[in-house]
Amino acid sequence: MTTSDANTPQSTENPGAHAAGRPVVAVIGDGQLARMMQTAAIELGQSIRLLAGAPDASAAQVCADVVLGDYRERADLDRAVAGADAVTFDHEHVPTEHLRALIDAGHSVQPGPDALVHAQDKLVMRRRLREIGAPVPPFAPIGSVADARAFAEAVHGAVCLKARRGGYDGHGVWFPDPGELPELVSRLLTEGVPLMAERKVDLVRELSAMCARTPSGEVACWPVVESVQRDGICVEAIAPAPGLPADLADQARALAERIAAELGVTGVLAVELFESRDANGRPRILVNELAMRPHNTGHWTQDGCATSQFEQHLRAVVDAPLGATDPTAAVTVMANTLGAAEEPAEPLAERFAAVWRRFPAARIHWYGKTHRPGRKLGHVNVTGADGSAAGIAATRRIAELAAGYIVDGVWADGHVERG
Amino acid sequence: MTTSDANTPQSTENPGAHAAGRPVVAVIGDGQLARMMQTAAIELGQSIRLLAGAPDASAAQVCADVVLGDYRERADLDRAVAGADAVTFDHEHVPTEHLRALIDAGHSVQPGPDALVHAQDKLVMRRRLREIGAPVPPFAPIGSVADARAFAEAVHGAVCLKARRGGYDGHGVWFPDPGELPELVSRLLTEGVPLMAERKVDLVRELSAMCARTPSGEVACWPVVESVQRDGICVEAIAPAPGLPADLADQARALAERIAAELGVTGVLAVELFESRDANGRPRILVNELAMRPHNTGHWTQDGCATSQFEQHLRAVVDAPLGATDPTAAVTVMANTLGAAEEPAEPLAERFAAVWRRFPAARIHWYGKTHRPGRKLGHVNVTGADGSAAGIAATRRIAELAAGYIVDGVWADGHVERG
């Protein structure tokens, strides 16, 4: 299917798809984040025009006004943004020069390229964060094997090597042994991967501080969450982060707010954080990554918060006032459903049914994607009224069991359903 | 725009609009109920094929697979339901013979015509309810002025005259003075309106008992709500119904369950109830109307309940297990935004902004319709943590002020925003 086929149902703008008197938002990108923006957009009457790569992409399945095209092509972007009140994204990969051109043409691009560059390039981000005094691990640009050797020496071998651009879900991050470092750096540089290194953090756990900011400067923060990672991929988020000291939570939220303001972020900002210890053993936070869009660690807000991150993002990018960010449950756990090595024989609909029979309050969110090992196919949100350690553990257990059954077709606890 | 124009973006089936391994539901009808089903469908990955009368209808604005056509035409219905796992509705007006033909052709029609006929014809419904012992006011078919006179005498002039079919939101209901009755009946019968009459109820208030039922027979009830009416239109719903004695609430829920089972309802059933007094002054309930689809008095579930009525309906019609119906707040108030006599000069987006600035936790839901006096354009949900009379009153006040500002552009309490 090509974008020039006039008979393609979704290849052209659909003027009927927009509500009178309500803003139209052009969303560049067709993944689950754009899909879940549409859920929020419907209720707000704030409609989406989507730039999608394929008519059956996750978000294209559920939007009425889809432009098929390539986000790297200026002409396709132009078609997607024509007449929209704001332009936003479900990823950070639109070329900066195109975004500048859109702004020059009078479009409201939220977040703008001057902010987005910090989510595109990890070195640019860390330099800027250090400039504004935000806590980051020691880091250095790596342009040669000599750079790598010097940095490794400075951090006593505790090197985390990162691709400056395009990494996600554990891709583009390496923890080489000192002996491997020169060869790895040499190979990556030869392949044209721009690199940086930072000191490996002595990690207690990962946290995420999220906020939204409007072009007018209003900011609203959500509670800080714990992000449970496996192989560099977020598998679970717990909101609020269990046992996080109030002062550290305040510090994390204040940090997110300050980064949003200093970098001119609009829409949702996720600040992925390392929780570590300082020299005196006291807990401290360090910035790991930034994402300028709704984020996996914010999915819990769909079922556990007054305003979901998707609604908040849509409100923020059109400079509407932000919604309340109060949690509506003592604890909310989000568990990702990541494609198993092999898709179970039991049909998906029956796996959903088994989960709902056992856990009628489990909230399944599904992205409409085909199975692939490790692929983010959906997530499950579970809320709990008991915020104690035992209550949190019980809520986590339900979310993990439910997500596990959906991907594996097996109850991890050996549960057998009585017929 | 006609349905035969192959270049119309939404006039044909869109195979890309459906998630692998998840059911496709054909929804007949293009109003706000279908629109809000799409919100739920996106997250369930359970996709909708819509039969819509116009490409810019409320639900057509937000669905990716829209068949344009007329629900009264068999050929259009056939196009809409082809390949769908289940067929359901956002209204009760599809001709029964078409539904039977769809079933004969092997389609799963939920609810089926044998149930739906009770939501289409008030006389058929009352006869059936009396048969199963459900409490209804005394009633009679009215085929002549003589019938009307006899019934009026029997009920001492307390006559409520109703069109058997097609009434809604106060249309098709009359409370004539005894002197007016003969002429009114004569005129309506001459116009071909099939009539029935029932004894005017000594009303305390209106309630709504809602449940969902699957083809397999699973039933889940929501808390009973109070439905506040103005000129025969629901303007507000309060969940749960304040001060409702537990035994009456149990009775109302049991009644809804029994009606669903006896009439073979599938999907969501709303039982609109009168709260009245018996001869001894004790509270009692009587059935007013039935709706076999999501209902205005269930909109509160979107923000105040574990499972919304729209998700529950979509799960029920494909015979999936039902979700939990526990409220997530002590009180949730839904206020309708009904088009004012004249649309305010202040743009809609600015009215939304004013509401959000004053009430950041107010949840606005918008249907994408153009303004028309009295038209249901959207609703506002507000939750409260305080279920006392004062807490409920405060929550109602916020919902009413918010909905009022959206339609009137004026704060009913004289509030002036500080700049």
Image (cartoon, coloured by chain):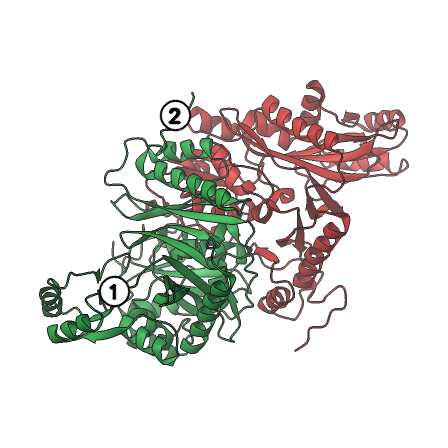
Chain colours: A red, B green
Which of the chains bears the disc numbered 1? B
Q: Position of residue B292 (x, y in %)?
A: 39, 66
User: Which amino acid type is shown beneath numbered disc 2?
Assistant: Val
Identify the secondary structure beneath mark 1: loop
Q: Position of residue B361 (x, y in %)?
A: 50, 39
**Residue A8 showing in the rendered view:** no
Q: Residue at x 52, y 60 (%)?
A: B19
Q: Is residue B308 left or right of residue B207?
A: right
- Viewer-proximal residue, B278 or A198? B278
Reply above or below: B239 against B71.
above
Q: CA distance from mark 2 to mark 1?
A: 43 Å
**Residue A95 showing in the rendered view:** yes
Q: Which residue is mark 1?
A: B166
Reply above or below: B20 against A367.
below
Reply above or below: B318 against B298.
below
Q: Is residue A181 left or right of residue B337?
A: right
Q: Residue at x 61, y 64 (%)?
A: A356
Q: Residue at x 34, y 77 (%)?
A: B130
- Viewer-proximal residue, B413 or B87? B413
Say whether disc 2 or disc 1 marks the residue closer to the N-terminus. 1
- Viewer-proximal residue, A63 or B195? B195
Instruction: Point out the image quarter for the C terminus of chain A.
Output: bottom right
Q: Position of residue A273 (x, y in %)?
A: 72, 34
Q: Is residue B244 left or right of residue B185?
A: right
Which of the chains bears the disc numbered 2? B
Q: Which residue is mark 2?
A: B416
Q: Are marks 2 and 1 on the same chain?
A: yes
User: Which amino acid type is shown beneath numbered disc 1?
Assistant: Gly
